Amino acid sequence: MQEREKTRLSGETERGHAREGVMEALYKRAVGCSADEVVEEYAVAEDGSEQLVKRRVKKRELPPDMAAVRMLLDAEKPLSAMTDEELAAEKTRLLRLLREAEEGSISFREEQE
């Protein structure tokens, strides 16, 4: 395989992972989630180094965001536009989810988070 082809494929893989991360974050925002808010205070010591003086962690509940819901729904690819490979992968993913839900090992909400 030529170097140019390898670079193109690795770039597509990176974009795919980035897209998955964005879609996951968008989903969390659409359904609501909890997040830790960390506030740290530092002071400068006599030797000039910074030292942590206070650290506060607060758990925040973020409510569902309707704009994120709309974006998520608009981003869904219709089944009619999927390739045969994409349809097969989606079928496999859904069957796995159903099997795991029947076994009680996961809930559908856990899979999406």
Image: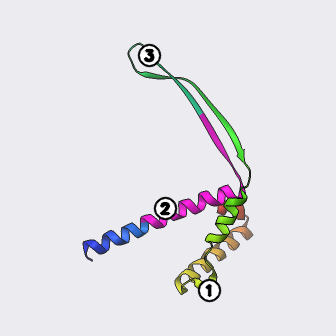
Q: Which mark is residue 45?
A: 3
Question: At label 3, which amino acid type do we have?
Answer: Ala
- Give the residue pinned by disc 1: 80
The question of residue 91 being in magenta is answered with no
Q: Quadrant of the N terminus?
A: bottom left
Part of the protein shown in magenta: 14-38
Of labels 2 and 1, earlier in sequence is: 2
Quarter of the rendering occupied by the C terminus? bottom right
Q: For the residue marked with disc 1, what is the amino acid?
A: Ser
- Is residue 52 shown above or below 94? above
Question: How far across and down, in percent of the image, does residue 103 sit?
Answer: 72, 68
Q: Residue at x 49, y 61 (%)?
A: 18
Q: Nearer the viewer, residue 43 or 93?
A: 43
Q: CA distance from mark 3 to mark 2?
A: 40 Å
Classify mark 3: helix, strand or loop. Answer: loop
Q: CA distance from mark 2 to mark 1?
A: 25 Å
**Would you call the spot at circle 2 few (<14 residues within 10 Å), some (14-19), or many (20 or more)?**
few
Q: Earlier in the sequence, mark 3 or mark 2?
A: 2
How many residues crowd mark 1 within 10 Å: few (<14), some (14–19), many (20+)? few
Q: Callout 3: 10 Å neighbours few (<14), some, many (20+)?
A: few
Q: Are marks 1 and 3 in contact (CB under 8 Å)?
A: no
x, y percent for residue 27: 65, 60
Q: Quadrant of residue 14?
A: bottom left
Q: Which residue is mark 2?
A: 18
User: Residue 68 vs residue 88: left or right?
Assistant: right
Which mark sits nearer the N-terminus, 1 or 3? 3
Residue at (43, 68) in percent of width and height? 13
| Residue 69 vertical placement versus 93 (above, below) | above
Identified at 71% across, 58% down, the residue is: 31
Residue 12 screen position, x and y as percent:
41, 70
